[in-house]
Image: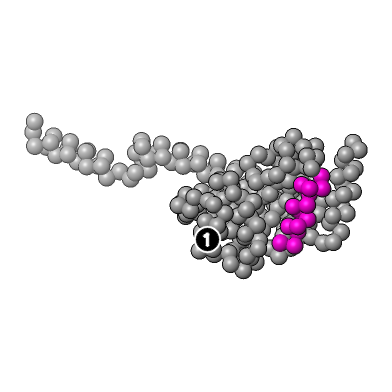
C-alpha cells in the first residue's frame, strides 16, 4: 500500500474521531432519549400542579379521594390489632385515643380512660395510639418509642402508668429504670429503644391521626367517628350519651 493511500486512510479515521458527539450514532440516540425524558418530566410536572390545584380548590376528584382516604382511616381505627388495648376485640364499641406521654391534658384524662373498662365492661374496647407533639413536647417521641418497646414485652400499661406519673423525668435513664421496675428484660428493652425499631409505627399513627384531623391530644374516636379533642369535665357525660346511643342501635 502506497504512503499516499495510508495517509488518506489515517486522515479519514482521524476525521471520524474528531466528529462532535452529537453527530455520531450513539450521540443521536442519546439526544432522542433525552428529548423523551424531558417531555415526560414536563408532563409529570404539569400533572402534579393540576392535582395540587384541584386539592387546593376542593375539586371534585380530589375531594372524593380525600373522603375515601378518611373513610379508610376510620376503618383502620375499627380493625387495628397492632396497638396497646384493653377490652375484647369483638366489643360493639371501639374507643381510640391519640395520646402524648408528655401532654398534661392526657395525664388529666387517665383516670377517666381507666374507668371505661370498669364502667362499660365487655361492651368497650379501648385502643391507644401514639401522637407525640414533638414541636412542643421534646421528650414525647422518645417516650412513645419506649412505650412500644414495653408493649413488645407485654408490659405496656404498667410502663404507660409510670411515664404519665413522671412526665418531668422522660429521659432514657428513667426509661431503663421504669423498665426494670415493671419487670421487663432490660437488655431487650435497651436494644429495642436504641435501634428505634418502632419509629415508623409511631409515624404511621401520627399520619393516620393527621388524615382524621387530629391536631392535639388527647383526641378520641368512638366507632371511627370523632367524639372529642382535649379533656374536660364534660367528657364523661359526652361518652355516656354516645355509648348509650350506640347500645340502642
**View extreme (bottom): residue:** 168
Q: Quadrant of residue 99?
A: bottom right
Q: Which residue is mark 1?
A: 177
Instruction: Measuring from the top left, give residue 49's x and y in whole percent.
Output: 66, 49
Q: Residue at x 41, y 40 (%)?
A: 30
Instruction: Measuring from the top left, give residue 155's x and y in whole percent.
Output: 59, 49
Q: Is residue 42 left or right of residue 6?
A: right
Quarter holding the N terminus is top left
State the residue in front, 97 or 118: 118
Chain part drawn in magenta: 107-120
Query: Is 110 contained in the magenta span?
Result: yes
Q: Residue at x 33, y 45 (%)?
A: 20
Task: Kindly tell me whether residue 67 is visible in this rendering.
Answer: no
Q: Residue at x 61, y 50 (%)?
A: 156
Q: Is residue 101 left or right of residue 192?
A: right
Of helix, strand and loop, which mostly describes the magenta segment? helix
Task: Kindly tell me whether residue 246 is visible in this rendering.
Answer: yes
Amino acid at each position: 500500500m502506497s504512503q499516499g493511500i495510508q495517509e488518506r486512510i489515517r486522515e479519514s479515521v482521524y476525521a471520524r474521531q474528531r466528529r462532535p458527539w452529537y453527530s455520531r450514532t450513539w450521540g443521536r440516540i442519546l439526544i432522542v432519549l433525552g428529548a423523551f425524558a424531558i417531555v415526560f418530566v414536563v408532563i409529570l410536572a404539569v400533572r402534579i400542579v393540576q392535582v395540587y390545584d384541584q386539592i387546593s380548590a376542593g375539586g371534585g376528584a380530589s375531594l372524593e379521594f380525600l373522603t375515601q382516604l378518611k373513610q379508610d382511616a376510620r376503618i383502620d381505627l375499627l380493625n387495628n390489632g397492632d396497638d396497646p388495648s384493653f377490652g375484647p376485640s369483638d366489643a360493639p364499641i371501639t374507643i381510640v385515643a391519640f395520646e402524648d406521654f408528655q401532654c398534661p391534658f392526657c395525664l388529666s384524662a387517665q383516670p377517666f380512660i381507666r374507668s371505661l373498662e370498669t364502667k362499660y365492661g365487655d361492651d368497650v374496647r379501648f385502643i391507644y395510639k401514639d401522637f407525640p407533639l414533638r414541636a412542643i413536647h421534646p421528650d414525647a417521641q422518645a417516650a412513645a418509642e419506649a412505650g412500644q418497646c414495653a408493649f413488645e414485652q407485654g408490659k405496656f400499661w404498667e410502663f404507660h402508668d409510670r411515664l404519665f406519673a413522671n412526665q418531668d423525668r422522660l429521659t432514657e435513664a428513667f426509661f431503663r429504670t421504669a423498665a426494670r421496675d415493671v419487670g421487663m428484660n432490660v437488655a431487650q428493652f435497651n436494644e429495642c429503644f436504641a435501634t428505634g425499631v418502632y419509629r415508623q409505627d409511631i409515624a404511621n399513627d401520627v399520619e393516620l391521626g393527621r388524615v382524621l384531623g387530629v391536631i392535639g391530644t388527647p383526641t378520641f374516636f368512638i366507632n371511627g367517628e370523632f367524639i372529642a379533642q382535649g379533656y374536660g369535665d364534660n367528657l364523661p357525660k359526652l361518652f355516656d350519651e354516645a355509648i348509650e346511643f350506640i347500645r340502642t342501635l
